[in-house]
Amino acid sequence: MALMDFIKKQFIDIIEWVEPADGTLAWRFPMADREIQNGGSLTVRESQMALFVNEGKVADAFGPGRYTLTTATLPILTYLQNWDKLFKSPFKSDVYFFSTRQQVDQRWGTTQPVTIRDKDFGAVRLRAFGNYSYRVADPKLFHTEISGTRDTYTVAELDGQLRALMLQHISDAVASSGIAFLDLAANQIEFAKALQEATAPAFEKIGLKLEGVTVQNVSLPEELQKILDQKIGMGMVGGDMGKFMQYQTAQAIPKFAEGAAGAGSGGGVVGDAMGLGAGVALGQVMAQQLSQGLQGAGPQAAAAAAPAGVKPDEVMATLEKLADLKAKGILTQDEFDAKKAELLKKLV
C-alpha cells in the first residue's frame, strides 16, 4: 500500500507552463511534496526559461526545448541528491518558470519636478515622461534578488521599483548627454539614449535587461519656456548668453516706458506728458546700457542706441500752458490737439 501511494505521488511526468495574459514574470510549478517522476518531461517554450531549485539553492537552468529528466540532464541535482537510487531517494525540487519576452510600453514619468544642474541656468526643475521596455535576462539573479519563493511574480508588482530607477537617473542622463537644458525638448532621442545608458546597469543588478527607452515629452518651467521662445526668435544670439541678456534688456524698454506712462495717466494732459517723459527718460538710460554691450555691432547699432536728447520737462511745461489756453477758450479743441500731437512727435 505504501508503495502504491508513493507511485501515485510520482505521477507528475510533464512539467510545462503556458504564460497567461496577466503579465506574469515568474511562476512556480505546483507539485505535491515537490516530487518528480524519473524520466519525466520538461518543456520550455521560446521566450521562457526554467530553474530547478534544491533546498533554496538554484541547481539547474534550462532554456527553450524539451528535456527528459534523468541523471544526464540534471547533473547538479544528481550530485546534490544522489539521485541514482531511484525510489529510495526520490527526485525533489522546486521548478520555476520565467518569462523572458520583452515587457513593452511600460510607463515612466516625473510625479514631481526633478531638479537638475544646467551649465547655463544652474539648478532647474524638469518634468518628463515616456515609456520603456525590458526583459528577464538572468533568471537566477532575478529569482534570488526579486521574485524569490513566491508562487507568482508579475509586471505590476515590479512597476513601481523600475519607474523609481528611471527617475533616479534622469540627472545623470542630462549630465552625460551634454545637451543644454533649453535644447532638451528638441533632442528627445539623444536624451532617451542617455537615460537608457545611465539606467541599464541598475536593471542588470536585478537580472533584467533594459531594451529601450523613449521620451515623449519634456516640460520646461514656465519662466524658462518664455526664454526659449525668445531665443528661437532671436537669430543674432546663437549660444552667447551675454548677448541674450542684452536682447532681453532691449525687449524690456517698451514695457518699462509703457508702465511709466500708465503711472501718470490719472493727471489728464499733464499726467500723460509726465508719464511719457518718464518712460522716455527710462528708455534713454536703458538704451545707453544696451549700447555699451553692442559696441562691437558697428556704428549703425551705436547710432540707433544713442539717446534722443529730448527734455521731457520742457514739453510738460508747454503742454500745461496749452491746456490753460484751451480752458480759457483762447484755443479750440482742434488747435490744442494739433499742438499736442506736434509736441509728442518730438518725444518719439
Image (cartoon, helix red, strand yellow):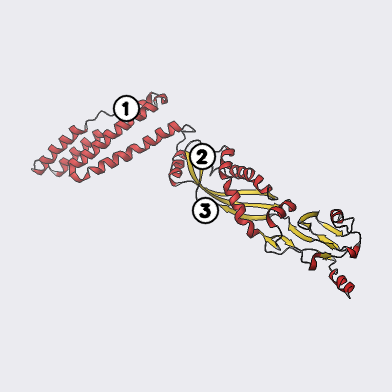
Q: Is the C terminus in the top left, top right, bottom left or bottom right quadrant?
A: top left
Q: The residue under label 3 is which amino acid type?
A: Thr
SS at badge 2:
strand
Residue 76 visible? The answer is yes
Q: Element type at marker 3? A: loop
* Res. 348 visible in picture: no
Estimate the x, y position of residue 293 in percent, counting from the top left.
Answer: 39, 27
Which residue of the protein is positioned furthest toward the bottom in this rendering?
1
Q: Residues within 10 Å of mark 3 (few under 14, many from 20)?
A: few
Q: Position of residue 143 (x, y in %)?
A: 72, 55
Q: What element does badge 1 sit on?
A: loop
Is the residue 31 above or below the residue 180 in the image? below
The residue tagged 1 is 306
Task: List the residue tagged with mark 3.
Answer: 111
Badge 3 or badge 1: first in the primary sequence: 3
Q: CA distance from mark 2 to mark 3?
A: 19 Å
What residue is drawn where x is 19% and y is 39%? 340
* Residue in the picture at 62% in, 55% down: 106
Residue 172, image quadrant:
top right
Above or below residue 74? Residue 121 is above
Disc 3 versus disc 1: nearer the observer: 3
Q: Horizontally, is 273 left or right of 16 in the view?
A: left
> What label sits on residue 117 in the rendered view?
2
Q: Quadrant of residue 92?
A: bottom right
Instruction: Please give left or right for residue 317 compared with residue 190 in the image.
Output: left
